[in-house]
Image (cartoon, rainbow, N blue to C red):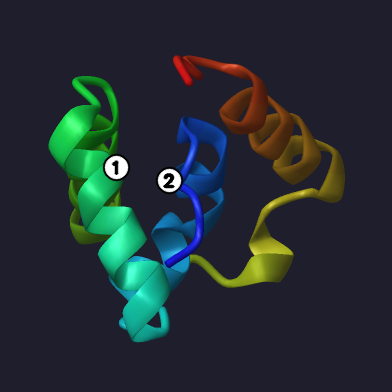
């Protein structure tokens, strides 16, 4: 098995995880990280709640500059490992 996931890698994989698109090895690494990280479990819960609350937004409904700013904020914020 590959090395443990970092928080940043988990954040990048959350959408694929929620869609059931991760391969078994990556899913195992995802769960292993959640088991040892106090911050990523709540992040995953927040993402689940966001999906339930908002449903699916058409990509064109979010301006490119807003999308890019949000993605940058997710990538930069709250990384502990």
Residue 56 in view of the camera:
no
For the point 31% across and 70% down, which residue is it? Answer: 27
Q: Is residue 61 left or right of residue 79?
A: right
Task: Name the outermost residue toward the right.
Answer: 65
Q: Residues within 10 Å of mark 2 (few under 14, many from 20)?
A: some
Q: Work out whether 3 lies above or below 42.
A: below
For the point 21% across and 41% down, which residue is it? Answer: 34
Q: Secondary structure at mark 1?
A: helix
Q: Secondary structure at mark 2?
A: loop
Name the N-terminal-most of marks 1 and 2: 2
Q: Work out whether 53 lies above or below 57.
A: above
Split into 4 quadrants, where in the image is the N terminus? Answer: bottom left
For the point 48% across and 43% down, which residue is it? Answer: 11
| Residue 44 location, quadrant | top left
For the point 46% across and 33% down, which residue is it? Answer: 7
Q: Is residue 63 left or right of residue 17?
A: right
Frontmost residue, 29 versus 43: 29
- Residue position marked by numbered label 1 in the rendering: 33
Frontmost residue, 24 versus 56: 24
Question: Residue 48: image x %, image y %?
Answer: 21, 53
Question: Residue 40: image x %, image y %?
Answer: 29, 32
Q: Give residue 4's mark.
A: 2
Q: Is residue 8 left or right of residue 39?
A: right
Q: Give residue 80's mark.
A: none
| Residue 24 location, quadrant | bottom left
What is the C-alpha distance between the residues marked 1 and 2? 7 Å
Residue 13 in view of the camera:
yes
Question: Residue 6: image x %, image y %?
Answer: 49, 36
The answer to whether marks 1 and 2 mark residues whose Cβ atoms lie closer than 8 Å is: yes
Q: Residues within 10 Å of mark 1 (few under 14, many from 20)?
A: some
């Amino acid at each position: 098995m590959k090395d443990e996931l970092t928080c940043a890698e988990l954040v990048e994989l959350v959408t694929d995880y929620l869609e059931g698109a991760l391969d078994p090895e990556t899913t195992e690494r995802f769960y292993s990280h959640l088991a040892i990280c106090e911050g990523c479990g709540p992040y995953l819960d927040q993402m689940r709640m966001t999906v339930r609350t908002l449903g699916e937004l058409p990509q064109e409904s979010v301006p490119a500059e807003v999308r890019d700013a949000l993605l940058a904020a997710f990538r930069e914020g709250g990384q502990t490992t």
